[in-house]
Amino acid sequence: MRKNISFSSTQILKRTPSSNVMSDESRTYTVDDALTTVGFGKFQILVLAYAGMGWISEAMEMMLLSFVGPAVQAAWNLSSHEESMITSVVFAGMLVGAYSWGVVSDKHGRRKGFLITATVTSTAGFLSALAPNYYFLLILRCLVGIGLGGGPVLSSWFLEFIPAPSRGTWMVVFSAFWTVGTIFEASVAWFVMPTLGWRWLLAFSSLPSLLLLLFYRAVPESPRYLCLKGRTTEAFIILEKVAKTNGQPLPPGILVSDHEIELNEKSTESEDAHLLPQNKFTDERPEITDHSKKDASTFALLFSPELIKPTLLLWVVFFGNAFSYYGLVLLTTELHNGRNTCGPTEYQPQHEEVSYKDVFITSFAEFPGLLISAFTIDKLGRKRSMSTMFFLCCIFLLPLVFHQPQAVTTGLLFMARICITTTFTVVYIYAPEIYPTSVRTTGVGVGSSVGRIGGMICPLVAVGLIHGCHQTSAILLFEFVIFVSGVCVLLFPFETSGRELTDATAPEKVSTVAA
């Protein structure tokens, strides 16, 4: 006989009239069921707007590095290495922040995670504009990087509000906010830098993070996270708001987590087959659910037998994406300058003339990349989309092994930027989908941290090698990293297109216990 799962009396009383309590009490639904029933509507649009503002903020803070570095180099007579450090310390901060905020949000909630990140980013970003010297600027930009490391928390939070059937499409729409941020930053820099200077650009770029703080009180917690923590009544209240805002009813029955259903099904199978006594099931249940409540075990779960292969492969892909994406952004401003003379004397004047135009033009390459992502992510799947675009990027970069005319170089970088934008978009959709709720932001955060290592290294390559007249070596290194990333995508163990998100931390372990 099937066991009953314990439910909140609040849910039963609120959802059903007294005459139907017993019939509805036997019916259950999950967060995925509820979101699929109410659909994507006005509530998710508001969530998208808030998360999108965070994505715009991160894009602007990253894009301004292409402009601030050369400007500060000229103002303070910095060396090429010192200029590169302004970019690298941001990625170093993101390396720390991406992991830290992932653990915080998995333990204390998504809302608290991006509250801290928005506070750190906006404060340190504004103070950067007032930095009195190079070393203060490095410290403040590193703090900005720590705040920006919380970007995966916002993407995971938004993901957990989207119905499974439309998840791929709406995550691509979410990614479009990054493109809006890059183009907006390039536009602002084009007007601000020649007249007001780099300090004003830093100040203006900190404003989007401040908007996140202004609207924070209205932001709901993820119902999926609340269910995982056993706070189903709070999750139910949020889902009621989603249903009311979207004008659709919730499914009949009682809200439960996927984890509760899975444990109940395993227990039923065990009892029917007379293979597992009742007390054993009861003893094992806390051992499984407690994983999501311990920092050490949360990180260790990434290396469980079920997750270690996708985790390691994902790290390589994150590294390759960040290395190549930010490398292409920096190559756009570096490749035309010093390419002919390879000397520092004529480098700086030329840089100021072409950087704004070329970065602005190549930033528009992200729009075709987003369209390709939207078209292919569900039709071809996550894996095929990423691998195809990685290999195409290699093809477009290959002619740059040799010196090309400026128009050809800009065109090739434009096409390569389309490809890498597609892979960057898809990997940020694929990564949260392969992890269960209890380790989702930690898994994506750690992967993003590994990507930041690529971001730290790429300025040394894009700036250092190009300045040293080693364009061929720089391009070949990009080719190698991008090709290896494409191969790793092919080795991913499963496709996530169309699959529901899972709350189970260790499904294989549950199966073993039940058996």
Image (cartoon, rainbow, N blue to C red):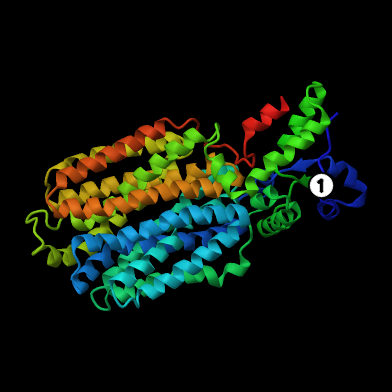
The amino acid type, in three-letter code, at marker 1 is Phe
Quarter of the figure that contains the C terminus: top right
Q: Can I make out residue 325 in this image? A: yes
| Quarter assignment of residue 269 | top right
Q: Is residue 112 left or right of residue 20?
A: left
Residue 382 in the image: state x and y as whole percent: 45, 37
Quarter of the figure that contains the N terminus: top right
Q: Is residue 190 left or right of residue 180?
A: left
Label 1 packing within 10 angstroms: few (<14), some (14-19), many (20+): some
Residue drawn at the location 32% of the way across and 35% of the way down: 484
Residue situated in front as seen by the camera: 101 or 395: 101
Residue drawn at the location 24% of the way across and 49% of the way down: 413
Residue lying farthest to the left in this orientation: 341
Q: Can I make out residue 372 in this image? A: no
Q: How many marks?
A: 1
| Quarter assignment of residue 55 | bottom left
Q: Which residue is mark 1?
A: 7
Residue 508 in the image: state x and y as whole percent: 62, 30
Question: Relative to residue 59, is residue 500 depicted above or below?
Answer: above
Residue drawn at the location 36% of the way across and 68% of the way down: 139
Residue situated in front as seen by the camera: 371 or 136: 136
Q: Is residue 105 left or right of residue 278?
A: left
Q: Is residue 47 left or right of residue 398?
A: right
Disc 1 is placed on an element classified as loop
Residue 239 in the image: state x and y as whole percent: 70, 54
Residue lying farthest to the front in this orientation: 296
Residue 251 in the image: state x and y as whole percent: 75, 46
| Quarter assignment of residue 44 | bottom right
